[in-house]
Image (spheres, helix red, strand yellow):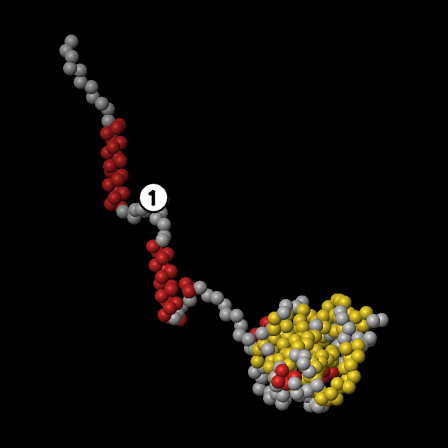
Amino acid sequence: MVILKELEVTVQVDGAPLHEYDDDSEEPEEPNTTTRYIEAKSGAEFILHFQVQETLNDLYAAIIFFVYIDSKYVAGRIVKKDEFIRRMDGVSTASEGVWQIRKFNFSAVELTDDNFGLKVQQLKDIVAGVGTITIKVLRARKITKSSVRDDGEVSKFDSVKALPEKALKGQALSHRTSLGRAEPSSALTAVSCKYIDEEGSPYAVVHFKYRSRKALQDMQIIPRSPTFVPLEKRPVDELTLEEARELLRRRTVKTETKPLSQTPVKVKRERDPEYDELLASARDKKAARIDKPVETIDLLDD
């Protein structure tokens, strides 16, 4: 979670904050600004969760969170005095007093060969903020007006469609934010305030750059998953002492538990010329004994 100036901002999926990774780039951040990377999974529905600590909440009439996704303004959420938590699930709209909400989803970036007749720099400008959620925080000294809206949120946000492939060269962009199907929702309140901070100089700014796990690995934001190699197939000189002991134990157990063979062992005799000659001679002698005529002696005298 990002905690900045007694503010807590998180991106949540299934009720739990996404794990955040530091931005290790060498580019210095603007004052009062923090940047985190988060992993985006295609099809996952997410919300933005805002929390103000009591020590800050008591000082101002309200804290306002302005949300930008993929470089486009979405809407704002206000945390009034004696309130501490707000959330944003998606884009709300209203028609004839009927409110609906289209929730945020992570979607894989789709590419197109169409350049829309624009130059390279113009194409880069199109995708400059894709894959980034930005929250700007302003303090209000006074709430001047509060009323229930009847026309939905004033939002220019729309789902980014296919992106020009040429504009993505050299950029590890993998996901964009899309909007889900419309669902019934409750009405929102419009608030007018007198601000302490100016829009160009907010009290705090938080950036969440969302990417696929592979993109985060390619950017070396997170380490790649190591390839598992069995101990038996690893060079012995690369094993630690504990690994070497384990390998020895396995080999010992394998030897002790190897079942005895039930099949008679046939020993192949080496060919010996002298033995073959003696065997042939013995066979000849045996054959001679069998073939020799048997002489009969009559002991009876006529």
Q: Dividing the image into 4 quarters, which one contains the N terminus?
A: bottom right
Instruction: Tell me what residue is drawn at x 70 percent, y 84 percent.
Output: 62
From the viewer's perspective, tell me whether residue 9 is left or right of residue 144. left
3 or 179, which is in the foreground? 3
Q: Taking 131 as reference, is 255 above or below it? A: above
Image location of residue 251, percent across then percent down:
36, 60
Label 1: few (<14), some (14–19) or many (≥20) C-alpha neighbours in 10 Å:
few
Q: Is residue 119 above or below residue 175?
A: below
Percent from the top left, x then y, of residue 28? 60, 88
In-front residue for pair 116/145: 145
Quadrant where the image shows the C terminus: top left
Can see residue 236? Answer: no
Total tally of numbered discs in the picture: 1
Residue that badge 1 annotates:
264
Q: Secondary structure at mark 1?
A: loop
Give the farthest residue toward the top: 302
Question: Along the horizontal axis of the image, is 29 left or right of 191?
Answer: left
Q: Nearer the viewer, residue 284 or 151?
A: 151
Q: On the image, which quarter does residue 3 sit in? A: bottom right
Residue type, label 1: Pro
Residue 231 lies left or right of residue 183; in this view the side is left
Residue 245: percent from left, percent from top: 36, 66
Task: Please tell me in which quadrant of the rendered image residue 52 appears.
Answer: bottom right
Q: Position of residue 221 (x, y in %)?
A: 56, 77
| x 81%, y 69%: residue | 98
